[in-house]
Amino acid sequence: MKSLLIETTLFEGKINEDTSGRTLVKGILQRAGAENQNGRVYPREILMREAKKYETLIKERRALGELDHPDSSVINLKNVSHNVKEIHWDGDDLVGTVEILPTPSGNILKELLRAGILLGISSRGMGSVTNIGDGKVKVGEDFELIGWDFVSNPSTHGAFMTPLQESVNKKQIQESVVCGDYCKAQDLMREIITEIA
């Protein structure tokens, strides 16, 4: 049975503007083959297949995402904050460039980033999972990627989005990702709420 699957990657909140004035950020969207804080593993071949399909939306400028995660498989246009401009693989990391749009939600997102707020970028998709032991599950062949949203709570270990054309101190990033029991508690609460809904 397919259900809504949500995975979040920590995003470092710095922004850049290109020569046309668009606000862009770049970094890891998702990691293949690694267990995240939700205990899920996304096989590389499944993520590669879905990333290839998603490139059609990117070419059509319809790779939209929302500010905050809805509990729905539909992109709600009144909450759209950004558009994914490109994606590519760097080893097992699916990396992308994201344009923050001048919408009400996009403006909120931009101001949060300017204030240095650490956010997550979270995938949303539909699919089933199979138990592989030790509290881990593997995402099934029927997984369908919907897109990525910006959220407040991370679930992917050690992955960051970074600003375009700026270097980032890796030690500072690693120190800021450690959130221990807080993240585990938040993830557990999110899973409980998702299962109840």
Image (cartoon, grey):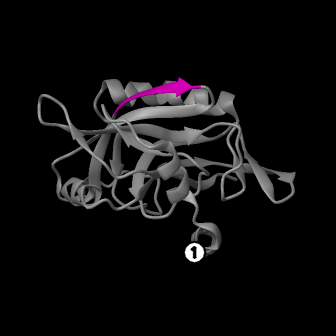
- Asked whether, in this view, residue 192 is left or right of residue 134, the answer is left
- Mark 1: amino acid: Ile
Q: Residue furthest left?
A: 20
- Residue 16 appears at what percent x and percent y? 23, 40
**In percent of the image, x 62 and y 51: which residue is there?**
157
Q: Residue at x 72, y 42 (%)?
A: 140
Number of numbered discs visible in the structure rendering:
1
Q: Is residue 123 visible?
A: no
- Say left or right for 187 vs 124: right
Report the side of 133 relative to 21 (left or right): right
Task: Specify the quadrant of the image occupied by residue 63.
Answer: top left
What secondary structure prevails in the magenta region? strand
Which is more toward the observer, 100 or 66?
100
**Front residue of this view, candidates 47 and 168:** 168
Residue highlighted by disc 1:
193
Region of the chain picked out in magenta, as a range: 85-90
- 127 above or below 112? above
Q: Is residue 108 magenta?
A: no
Check the image and report above or below for 171 versus 54. below
Measured as percent of width and height from the top left, residue 185 is found at: 62, 74
Residue at 67% across / 27% down in the picture?
Answer: 45
Residue 40 rendering spot, x and y as whole percentages: 70, 51
Asked which secondary structure carries label 1, the reply is helix
- The quadrant holding residue 48 is top right
Q: Classify residue 107 as left or right of residue 80.
A: left
Q: In this view, which residue lies farthest toward the right?
A: 133
The image position of residue 54, as x and y in percent, is 45, 31
Image quadrant for the C terminus?
A: bottom right
> Few, some or many C-alpha atoms within 10 Å of disc 1 (few <14, some 14-19, many ≥20)?
few
In this view, 15 is above or below 186 = above
Residue 98: image quadrant is top left
User: Which residue shows up at 43% across the image and 60% down it?
Assistant: 69
